[in-house]
């Protein structure tokens, strides 16, 4: 299911919140008491970290919607990109008997035990943004986020059709090793370019989704690779770091080395508008409103869709010029 009308969703959320608040006054529902005596849904959210502009926008979206005014008590934990910190936070949320647990898993594996603990405590879990690889998918109620394989495919199709008409050497900056977006974007990109014999991926390394590591890895690649025609970066922040490295090496990003990335955060869109990036596939971070709607439903024992795919656009330089002035993140 695609979700693209944020305004409509916010209105829907306000309506849902109003209904739940009224129901709560009558003593129904599964919600717990807030400090003002009003019933709220207590939700524990274990965030990945603050590795990128995308993550900052995602955190902001979640914090701005899961508020007391909207009927929530939010317990927010930043895992600093460490899965073990997320496991610790989830266990703490279970001990605190929150109504709902939501999290964006740093990596795909290693979640079975802690999710079984949440299930045993009868606390529903919502995955946002990133998927988990678990044996039993009843361990979570719903997963909302982008289709990362499709994002990688769209990047690959652009590279293949726009630059792959002659032999080209491509370098890839991967996201965090073992994370769903890194695994899926790599897969989607590889699938899209597979049939084009002109494209050779000469190096593929992780830059951990951060600007500083994107810069550092690109510096190394510029030294070790005799020819780089195209950079595919799994997110804008790594592309922006790589741009610094490319400029420091006396080359022009967007011209001498073409750049395709994923996210569409403001800084990335600015670089695209400035001609330093050639194409960006969007990954929408504004998941707060949909998470709020889902959390209300699961807290009240309702059924929800197992998978909700957010809608992503894509921008070339001309489209970015049009979109940038009204960009929200
Ligand atoms: O999981 C989404 C990815 O995580 C974003 O593309 C990236 O910027 C972030 O760190």
Image (cartoon, rainbow, N blue to C red):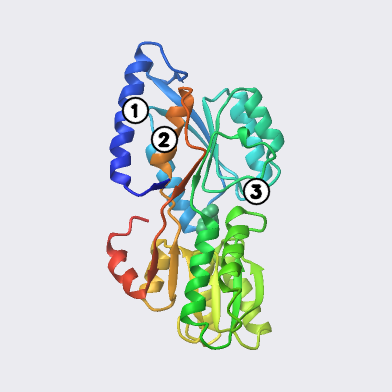
Relative to 300, say whether 130 is above or below.
below
Label 2 SS: helix
Residue 167, image x, y percentages: 58, 87
Give the CA separation, mark 2 to mark 3. 23 Å
Q: Earlier in the sequence, mark 2 or mark 3?
A: 3
Residue at image point 66% right, 38% down = 87
Crowding at label 1, few (<14), some or many (≥20) Cα neighbours within 10 Å? Answer: many
Q: Disc 1, disc 3: CB below 8 Å? A: no
Crowding at label 3, few (<14), some or many (≥20) Cα neighbours within 10 Å? Answer: some
Residue 58, image x, y percentages: 45, 49
Decide if residue 207 is on the left or right side of residue 148: right
Q: Quadrant of residue 17?
A: top left
Decide if residue 307 is on the left or right side of residue 80: left
Relative to 37, say whether 245 is above or below.
below
Residue topped by disc 2? 292
In the picture, the disc for residue 17 is 1
Label 1 SS: helix
Residue 229, image x, y percentages: 55, 84
Residue topped by disc 3? 108
Q: Disc 2, disc 1: CB below 8 Å? A: yes
Relative to 109, say whether 224 is above or below.
below
Looking at this view, is 145 or 71 the one in front? Answer: 145
């Amino acid at each position: 299911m695609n979700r693209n009308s944020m305004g409509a969703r916010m209105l829907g959320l306000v309506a849902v919140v109003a209904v739940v608040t009224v129901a709560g006054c009558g003593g129904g529902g599964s919600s717990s008491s807030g400090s003002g005596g009003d019933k709220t849904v207590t939700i524990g959210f274990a965030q990945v970290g603050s590795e990128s502009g995308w993550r900052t926008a995602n955190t902001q979206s979640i914090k701005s919607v899961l508020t007391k005014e909207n009927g929530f008590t939010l317990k927010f934990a930043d895992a600093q990109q460490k899965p073990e910190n997320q496991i610790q936070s989830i266990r703490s949320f279970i001990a605190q008997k929150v109504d709902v647990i939501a999290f964006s898993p740093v990596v795909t594996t290693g979640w079975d035990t802690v999710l079984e603990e949440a299930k045993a405590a009868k606390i529903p879990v919502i995955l946002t943004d990133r998927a988990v690889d678990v044996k039993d998918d009843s361990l979570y109620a719903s997963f909302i986020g982008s289709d990362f394989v499709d994002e990688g495919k769209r990047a690959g199709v652009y590279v293949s059709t726009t630059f792959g008409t002659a032999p080209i050497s491509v370098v890839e900056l991967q996201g965090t090793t073992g994370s769903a977006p890194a695994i899926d974007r790599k897969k989607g990109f590889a699938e899209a370019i597979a049939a084009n014999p002109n494209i050779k991926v000469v190096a593929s390394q992780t830059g951990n989704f951060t600007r500083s590591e994107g810069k550092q890895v690109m510096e190394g690649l510029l030294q070790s690779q005799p020819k780089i025609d195209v950079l595919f970066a799994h997110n804008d922040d790594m592309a922006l770091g790589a741009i610094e490295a490319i400029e420091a090496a006396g080359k022009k990003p967007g011209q001498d080395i073409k750049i395709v990335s994923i996210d569409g955060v403001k800084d990335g869109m600015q670089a695209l508008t400035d001609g330093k990036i050639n194409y960006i596939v969007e990954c929408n971070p504004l998941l707060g409103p949909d998470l709020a709607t889902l959390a209300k439903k699961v807290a009240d024992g309702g059924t929800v869709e197992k998978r909700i795919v957010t809608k992503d656009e894509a921008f070339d330089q001309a489209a970015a010029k049009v979109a940038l002035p009204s960009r929200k993140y």
